[in-house]
Amino acid sequence: MAKKKVILAYSGGLDTSCCIKWLKDTCNLDVVCFSAFIGEASDKAVLRKRAYSAGASKVYIEDLKKEFADDFILPSLWAHANYEGKYLLATAIGRPLIAKHLVSIAHKEKAQFVAHGCTGKGNDQVRIEVGVRSLAPKLKIIAPLREWEFSSREEEIDYAKRNKIKIDVTKKSPYSIDRNIWGAAIEAGILEDPWREPPEDAYYLTKGKVPTKSRYVEVTFIHGTPVALNGKKMNLVSLIEKLNKITGQYKIGRTDVIENRLVGIKSREIYEAPAATVLMAAHAELESLVFDREFVHFKDVLSLKYSELIYYGLWYSPLKEALDSFFVKQQHLVTGTVKVKLSEKCAQVVGRKSPYSLYREKLATYSHDDQFNHEASKGFIELWGLPYVVATQVGKKSMARKKR
Ligand code: ARG
């Protein structure tokens, strides 16, 4: 009888390479690997070779940057998704994409299992598993890192060597890094001391010498989608990549966070989101120009909830879907250009324009062109403050009674 199949989310690192062999031997499964490229592509040939050396029977390597940008980054941008005010959720939005592809490959390969290399104390295990279960409740999920016997990296290296898995242990960074085009997350090593300032070598997207001169970048949006940089049209993936390069030089979008994980612990992590930080600021700025006050304020309330849902692994939940339709509803108005000034660790919006702008200079001006009806303010204030006038009168009366 043919062996049962498992689709493994494969990164090419030590953990997931050991997972291949472990799943094959311990669970007696035929292991099909799936790797998603949503950051810079690593060498496909090396990845493939490594997976086969560990015992994979088939390897899928897919460039999913476009899908990631269109279906995961854009909705997050429209929602202004930002967990605890400091994390633009790059890793968190990558996981539901991986879950989706694990499920579709599992269907294609008629597999009953999927597996991942997440640890047992992070948020990513939750995101992948809840994602998979929401899309395909019948698939069984295996998380080797929660089950296997290895308790250190050295033991894994030993296991890999014994089994002739072609791993590369020389390039191991002292940190745990996850990155894609929306940003990088870096933790572990000396970063585990929350008092210790992150050293420069911990950064990936925002390193190098900062240009001495500040510069401007203009981002143009059509219906909420960034479509051009400095007037030059480009697709969303290229735009994000280009902007990462430009703003990364200025070390824009770094944060250093004590984060409340879903699994109950606090962790220290540093993030880099150079392009995301600028796009988020520019998009929000354009919205303040074209949306009315109530809309802008209410949206902030929903953004908070949306960010939690994403962080908590509930990308495929009904509430997330409903909130998406709220955020998309007015994006047709988010058309225009925002000018951002870049200097060291700072992206400052300094100009904005839109054909749908609600700003009226004639209403706002303090010059003699002013068309604002000052007299109307008097009646407005009288009625606006009326409830509090009455409340104060009643309060005074009750105080007087109390004294007697
Ligand atoms: N804490 C972040 C999250 O839960 C990032 C997790 C991955 N971080 C890493 N350095 N591998 O989304």
Image (tube, rainbow, N blue to C red):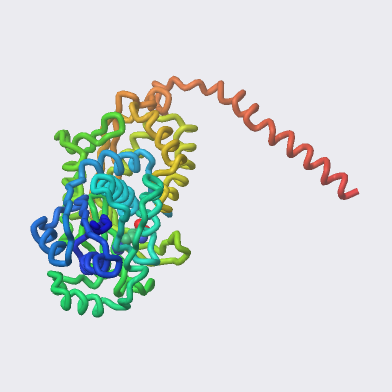
Q: Quadrant of the N terminus?
A: bottom left
Residue at image location 82% in from the left, 46% down from the top: 399
Between 12 and 297, the one lying in front of the other is 12
Question: Residue 27 at what x, y percent from top left?
Answer: 30, 66
- In the image, taking residue 47 as reference, residue 348 lies left or right, namely right
- In the image, taking residue 369 as reference, residue 390 lies left or right, namely right
Question: Residue 192 at what x, y percent from top left?
Answer: 35, 72
Residue at image location 48% in from the left, 37% down from the top: 297
Between 85 and 392, the one lying in front of the other is 85
Question: Residue 373 at what x, y percent from top left?
Answer: 50, 20
- In the image, taking residue 99 as reference, residue 31 lies left or right, namely left
Residue at image location 29% in from the left, 43% down from the top: 73
Residue 50 found in image quarter = bottom left
**Eyeballing the image, is 27 above or below 249?**
below
**Eyeballing the image, is 134 above or below 331?**
below
Residue 288 found in image quarter = top left
Residue 272 found in image quarter = bottom left
The image shows a total of numbered marks equal to 0
